[in-house]
Image (cartoon, rainbow, N blue to C red):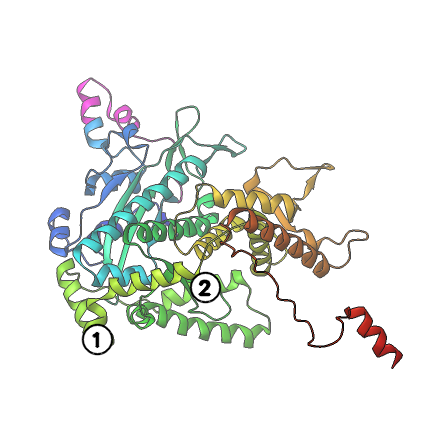
Amino acid sequence: MTFKQVSTGSAYRYYLRQVAVGDGRRPRGKNLDQAQEEAGVPPGVWMGKALAAVGLTAGSRVTHRQMANLFGKGRHPASEQIIEVRLAVGDTPAKAERATRLGYRIQKWSGADLVFRAPGSVQILWALASDAVREVIEAAHTRVIDEVVDQIETGLLIVRRGRGSTPERAEPGVIAARFRHYESRDGQPLLHDHLVLSVKVRRSDGQWGTLHTRTLLEHTVALSELYNQRVLEEICTDLNLATTPRYPTPGQRPVMELAGIPEDLIDWAATRNEATMRRLDELVAQYRSRTSQPVTAKIRHRMMARASTDTRPAKKTTHPLPVLRARWRDGATARVGQAVVDHLLDLARAAARALLTLARPVMDLTVAALDVVATVSVFHSKQFHHRHLLAEARRYLTRTFHGQPVQPHTDTAIVATALRMYCRDTTPAASGEQQLLPLAHRSFTTAWELRQAGAGTAMSAYQQARAEAVIRAAQYRAQTLKERPVAAPQPRLQHRPAHGPRHSSAWYRNRRRRG
């Protein structure tokens, strides 16, 4: 999942002219419904718990006028009807216009564009398998998007109010327009949804306020990992599949993919990624030669965004999904052969059976928490936040359970264990006392980074914590795993010499000592 802010004013027109028609180009003056039908993409639909407050229903079609009012002007989607009713009852034009406003006028950002796309192996299976498999994957994709939006609505909506711009939690509920696309700019299979989320949310007093989008930006990686974990779990459960790690970038975390999907096909579809990575290597080399400094994770993330922009091709004419699937099938057949393409699901299921037969996923919270903290400390230096641990915990679960379902809230349990056992709060103090900040705004470091009196070096503290966690994991396995049946003990055969008495081993040792 990626995050991009939508500026106020005329930025919404980009979504109506291009995003709404499958990243093609909508001819000027052509009706939106007709353009979407010709492009072969489904119409945009509304979603979110705050739709009822503006008279919209979930799943209803997104219109040009609604987008212009909400994202262009920050007003009620049905502003024209409201003004007409107000004028009919005797209100002045100015008063009727004020009735359409949703809180204060937006200043800079009118929304946020969240793009959800599944891993590469899922894209391959969706594009080349049967229609029944395609529908299963699309249904799982839609369900998981609803789950992620629900988590945004219930935990990440922050508004600022008053002269001091005091942050407070908003009422659960957003207004969002969702647009589905089927291909990348290179014409390769890429099932993804654009979720254009309005910054207009309800405050605790019932009035409309403006969403603090920085909170969403900070939690983008954690939300992305939640989407990846859950969509793989849903697909693996529905289709009897499993996941396995793939290492496309040396030195970076592995990417979890469906087991059995040939990597050659994943590379065939990821043409945009190949071009982006080549450009990224060039930018990294330039940075190192210019500064003689190592590339941190933050700098690499910025370089990745620039590399993606530099290698972004021009948009092409969109085609209906049946035409795209036929073209993709021909390209994949030329790449790996007809037999592989025809039996792609069978190959994935066979690989899943073999993987799950050998792998028995068992997790101990203490070991999982330690591994998560150790990984985060490597990629985020000595200071990190709660969201970093949460994102890594979700990666850990996907890697450990191979796409099999995990008990709800396991990720938060891992993070809670990590904070309690292996992390120390390093939030700056204020007025001699530690700030009473929410957990999301606190900073942490590893316990072994803080050298206390008599505690030894940081490495020895880490090794001690690792050893204790491994011992607890062994005890946990002994208690939870089923014991294998043990054969009844056989009587030992006593081999006595053919002549002379049988002496003990101590007698022979004493004899050797005496020479």
| Callout 2–callout 1 Cβ contact below 8 Å | no
Residue carrying label 1: 337
In the image, 123 versus 157, the foreground residue is: 123
Most distant residue in the right direction: 514
Q: For numbered disc 2, what is the local secondary structure?
A: loop
* Residue at the spot 69% in from the left edge and 41% down from the top edge: 429
89 above or below 250?
above
The image quarter containing residue 358 is bottom left
Residue 145 lies, in percent from the top left, at 33, 45
Q: Magenta stretch?
A: 83-108
Q: Earlier in the sequence, mark 2 or mark 1?
A: 2
**Crowding at label 1, few (<14), some or many (≥20) Cα neighbours within 10 Å?**
few
Percent across and percent down for residue 60 are 20, 37
Q: Nearer the viewer, residue 498 or 359?
A: 498
Would residue 430 be seen by someone viewing this image from the given angle? yes
**In this picture, residue 274 sits left or right of residue 492:** left
SS at mark 1 in the image: loop
Horizontally, residue 402 falls left or right of residue 190, namely right
Residue at the image point whose x is 28% and y is 68% from the top: 269
- Numbered circles on residues, count: 2
